[in-house]
Image: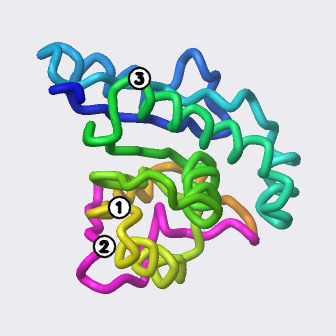
Amino acid sequence: MSDKKIFITIHGIKTSEDKSFLGHLTAHKLENGGYIIVKQFKYGYINCFDAYIKAWFPERLSPVVNKLNNYILGIVKEYGPQTPITIAAHSFGTIVLYEYLKKFSNVSFNAVILFNSVLREGAFIELETMRLKGQFHDCFNYVNNRDWIVALAPWPFGKAGTRGLKEPKIIKTWNL
């Protein structure tokens, strides 16, 4: 077992995977002390039209979700199953994370963090069920109504990143 903590980031669709704001920000801020290791999951560039289709038909995300599962299992193998892992996703990455959590329950996370999520507001029901089953300890939803891409995202995308989740108090929401 490692004495370090792992922080995994998942980028959004309009982000070059090498220039992920979330990944670089957290890597710069968190890795300075050497106690937290930031890992950036890179699923590749997805254009807006393809993202829209994948949001309508989540099963089309299976290759990305399976890739995320293999990535996480590799981290668990490298650092040990007792190493605390927090996973954070931004924008379309929140759909990737949500679909992963629905499909796999083989890893328990310290926390799940959503930034400017495009999940539907009612997703808290499934997220709370996942939390109660032990898939993660805490869920944080950070809301920013200044992210115009998330704010203008059409159906079937949700507005959890601009309006918040219609959540119980267990899922914490903060405005950025």
The secondary structure type at the circle numbered 1 is strand
**Residue 84 place in picture, x, y as percent:** 26, 42
Mark yes or no: residue 125 visible.
yes
Identity, as a three-letter code, of the amino acid under mark 1: Phe
Q: Nearer the viewer, mark 1 or mark 2?
A: 1
Does residue 165 belong to the magenta stretch? yes
The disc placed on residue 171 is 2
Q: Which residues are magenta?
A: 156-176
- Residue identifier under label 3: 78
Q: Is residue 87 above or below residue 11?
A: below
- Between the residue at mark 1 and the residue at mark 3, the CA separation in whole angstroms equals 20 Å
Q: Specify the amino acid type for callout 3.
A: Glu
Instruction: Give the CA distance from mark 2 to mark 3.
Output: 30 Å
- Rendering coords of residue 50 (x, y %): 86, 46
Q: Nearer the observer, disc 1 or disc 3?
A: 3
Q: Tell me residue 58's x, y (percent).
A: 78, 62
